Image (spheres, grey):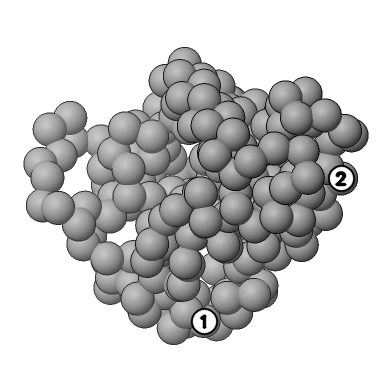
């Protein structure tokens, strides 16, 4: 058995989300002598619309590589050289995050059973920043590797994005087969459909009681922590 998890609202939940809260910190540190916060906020809103348009096309808009230079282009100066810790700080300021209920205990139990675990996430933030946050939340040690669409360039359900994770997991665990892999996620269109198209099992976290009309989900659970019961671990 191999488990690959989605990140946001699967192993980590956001209690609140406000990108402007993070943007203000960024402005105060780097740009308050070059523009007003309202000008910074206006550009942030423009870039968010662009991000959403790209996501609808299945394309990622990496924050450090693509978005940061746009602030320098608009307001002058060099592009901010953001470290992994600063990137993680920004994301955590925008999102008040914590492990999903019962996930820490579940991951500990799965690790004790020797089950390999990975993370595959749609995010404009880097895999290193996502890993940093998992470590800060006390659950990073359970995952062998984290992949982010920020590096891959395309978002789930892109099959190639899934395939890079599947190939790595099977290379590291040659005793396992593709059909032994389960992807765990909360968004039907990206997580379940993507896993199904990649030929692996899907565990869908269906918190709203929606119907699985196309029936590609192998398992349907209401919370991530129920996974051990479904898998019989």
Total count of labels: 2
Q: Earlier in the sequence, mark 2 or mark 1?
A: 2
Horizontal and vertical percent position of residue 203: 32, 52
The residue closer to the viewer here, 84 or 31, is: 31
As drawn, 108 above or below 6: below
Asked whether, in this view, residue 20 is left or right of residue 13, the answer is right
Secondary structure category for the residue under label 2: loop
The residue closer to the viewer here, 165 or 11, is: 11
Name the image quarter holding the C terminus: bottom left
Q: Quarter-wise, where is residue 114 in the image? A: bottom right
How many neighbours does mark 2 have within 10 angstroms: few (below 14), some (14-19), or many (20 or more)?
few
Point 89% across, 34% down: residue: 78
Asked whether, in this view, residue 149 is left or right of residue 64, the answer is left
Which label sits on residue 81? 2
As drawn, 28 above or below 56: below
As drawn, 165 above or below 128: above
Residue 198 seen from this side: no
- Kindly report the distance in space between the C-alpha atoms of the residues bearing marks 2 and 1: 36 Å
Horizontal and vertical percent position of residue 227: 33, 67
Point 64% across, 75% down: residue: 136
Q: Which residue in the protein does label 1 denote? A: 108
């Amino acid at each position: 058995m191999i488990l690959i998890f989605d990140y946001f609202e699967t192993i980590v939940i956001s209690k609140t989300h406000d990108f402007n809260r993070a943007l203000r910190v960024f402005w105060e540190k780097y740009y308050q002598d070059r523009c007003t916060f309202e000008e910074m906020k206006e550009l942030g809103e423009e870039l968010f619309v662009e991000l959403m348009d790209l996501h609808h096309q299945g394309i990622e808009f990496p924050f450090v590589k693509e978005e940061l230079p746009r602030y320098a282009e608009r307001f002058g100066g060099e592009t901010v050289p953001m470290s992994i810790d600063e990137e993680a700080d920004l994301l955590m300021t925008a999102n008040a995050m914590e492990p999903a209920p019962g996930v820490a205990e579940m991951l500990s139990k799965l690790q004790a059973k020797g089950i390999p675990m990975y993370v595959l996430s749609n995010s404009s933030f880097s895999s290193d920043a996502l890993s940093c946050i998992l470590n800060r939340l006390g659950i990073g040690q359970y995952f062998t590797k984290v992949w982010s669409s920020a590096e891959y360039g395309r978002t789930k359900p892109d099959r190639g994005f899934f395939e890079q994770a599947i190939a790595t997991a099977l290379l590291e665990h040659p005793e396992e087969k593709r059909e032994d892999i389960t992807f765990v996620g909360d968004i039907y269109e990206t997580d379940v459909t993507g896993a199904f198209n990649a030929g692996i099992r899907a565990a869908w976290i269906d918190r709203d009681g929606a119907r699985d009309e196309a029936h590609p989900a192998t398992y349907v659970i209401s919370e991530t922590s129920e996974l051990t019961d479904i898998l019989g671990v």
